[in-house]
Image (tube, coloured by chain):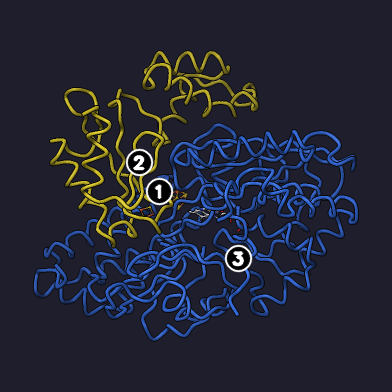
Amino acid sequence: MPEKPSRFRDPTKQSMLLTALYIAQEQYGYLSEEAMERTAARLGLTLKDVYSTASFYTMFRTQPLGKYVIQVCEGLSCFLVGGAERLVDYISRKLNIQPGQTTPDGLFTLQTVQCLASCGTSPTLKVNDELYEDMTPDKVDRLLDQLAGR
Amino acid sequence: MPFERILLRNVDVPNSEKIGTYLERGGYQALRKALQEYTPDELIEIVKASKLRGRGGAGFPAGLKWGFMPKGDVTKYVCVNTDEGEPGTFKDRLLVERDPHQVIEGTIIASYAVGAHRAFVYIRGEFFMGVKRWIKAIADAYDHGFLGKNILGSGFDLDLSVHRGAGAYICGEETAMLNSLEGKRGEPRLKPPFPAQVGLYGQPTLVHNVETLANVPHIVLRGPEWYASIGTEQSTGPKIFCISGHVKRRGNYELPLGTPLRKIIFEHAGGMRDDRPLKAVIPGGASTPVLTPEYLDITMDFESLAKAGSMLGTGAIIVLDESTCMVDVARRLTKFFAHESCGRCTPCRVGTQRMLEILNRIEYGQGQEGDIDLLLSLCEGIAGRTFCPMGDAAVNPTLSTIKHFRDEYEYHIKHKRCPAA
Ligand SMILES: Cc1cc2nc3c(=O)[nH]c(=O)nc-3n(C[C@H](O)[C@H](O)[C@H](O)COP(=O)(O)O)c2cc1C
Ligand code: SF4
Ligand code: FES
């Protein structure tokens, strides 16, 4: 696909791209091709521009995920105090999914992430936008129960 | 006498993030003083005299950087780097969540000094609370006339807004951050030209770390001589040290630069967890070479750490006790860098993956004769041969653990197992 030369792009509009992608992701649940096409049209960009940016950032998803996305930090400081894969394994067994997978009921997706800048209160994990610090298996149990509405 | 906190003086006060609290505690007086009593050039001289050095990792003199910004009527920008995400570092999040106005005040003063009328906060996408705090604080600063047109009647205008990243550690590198601000892939740009010459939208841009900017109001208010009297000759001022790992009291400790490492670990952080012996320390964040206990009496400042073959970095101290496997440490940190490589250049993209494969197999007892040399030659092929400084950072964990703990690597390979497992 021939690309428009960059001088035809409006830099102010292109700067809105990350924000626009967040909005589209919120509306569609994930960045479907349709969502990216609409974003491109709105900002006067090509689909290629949009895809190129969207695919670079880990927080943009091109497929639907669970209602609650659990992201466990696997950084060194979290590992040193009993986190990282120890916590991932625990959640993995409990939900019966591997990292990267979603529970069949669509409730939980499990992911691993790098440092969440909470290394002094590790082990840490995030559920959607919420940060949880000093996590233990007990706290994980309670959190998952609460999220599942049990 | 305990050190009187400067940057963290507000963080434990209730509602410390609110503008009312900040004002009650003397906030925005430095801005008033800067605008009313000093010309922009005088402010640059003040910051030069304070010898403030950047807290984002490299320690570059801030006043010098301000001086590099061209004078006169060109469009210039200021960017606040809130992309913190290197394992071990958690100070900027604290500053932004608990005392955002201190950083805003520093940003306004810096913008006035370099003649920028537009400033951006770049914050990593994961910091949801931080985004909310930034947005609220900026709105309140506008309402009080600290941002917008004719700030405090000075005739100086400044707009400040928040730009949320979306999950990419490399966007903390200043030129990658500029690309991300422009809505592009967050890949670094070749330097030179440096952002102070050609930055955001091709215009001169001053990029600073959150902690660096938080120092600025105090320098203006209390004077550069006072500031320079804290710390050492070449590393002045207070520093927030983030301590994590095997200590009793992890957390952020604000202390003068030049505080002995031993004191930070054994007094402030309460010593080793379960009183196990200390095995190694990563002194400045994931990218800084590890040190052994012989270095415990080192002072934590830019020059001492450089002399010891490491770096002050972000001041993120990761403490490791004797139960820690150093091959595993290298493997985990290398995994971080391999994961975060932006992929733009081959030595970093492929090299870190290759290193990770080898480190994995050594750790899991499948290491082969010659693997250590292979790792060393990979490091040599990466360091100094990449587009941005991340390549150099990525080899440090492996190089320094081989240097100080080669016997552990050899044990893994010879006995086909991890002695710590
Ligand atoms: C791979 C990489 C990641 C970086 N990440 C950050 C970061 O998260 N925050 C930051 O302030 N500086 C980061 N830096 C340093 C910036 O490039 C830049 O030097 C700094 O923001 C300048 O601010 P200072 O002069 O106040 O230190 C990073 C550098 C590299 C090479
Ligand atoms: S060194 Fe790594 S992070 Fe830096 S530009 Fe090259 S691939 Fe990207
Ligand atoms: S290493 Fe897990 S929060 Fe930093």
Q: In this rendering, is residue B230 above or below B75?
A: below
Q: Chain of mark 3?
A: B
The colour chain A appears in is: yellow
Residue A116, disc: 1
Horizontal arrangement in the rendering, residue B50 relative to residue B179 (left or right): right
User: Is ligand 1 closer than 8 angstroms to the Cβ of mark 3?
Assistant: yes
Amino acid type of the residue tagged 1 in the rendering: Leu
Residue where numbered disc 3 is placed = B59
Please provide percent x and percent y for residue A45: 54, 20
Residue A126, disc: 2
Amino acid type of the residue tagged 2 in the rendering: Lys
Please provide percent x and percent y for residue B152: 86, 41
Residue sitting at x 15%, y 76%: B411
Circles 2, 1 touching at the beta carbon (< 8 Å): yes
Q: Which chain is blue?
A: B
Q: Nearer the viewer, mark 3 or mark 1?
A: 1
User: Is ligand 3 closer than 8 angstroms to the Cβ of mark 1?
Assistant: yes
Dot 2 crowding, Cα within 10 Å, few <14, some 14–19, many 20+: many
Please provide percent x and percent y for residue B165: 51, 37
Q: Chain of mark 2?
A: A
Dot 1 crowding, Cα within 10 Å, few <14, some 14–19, many 20+: many
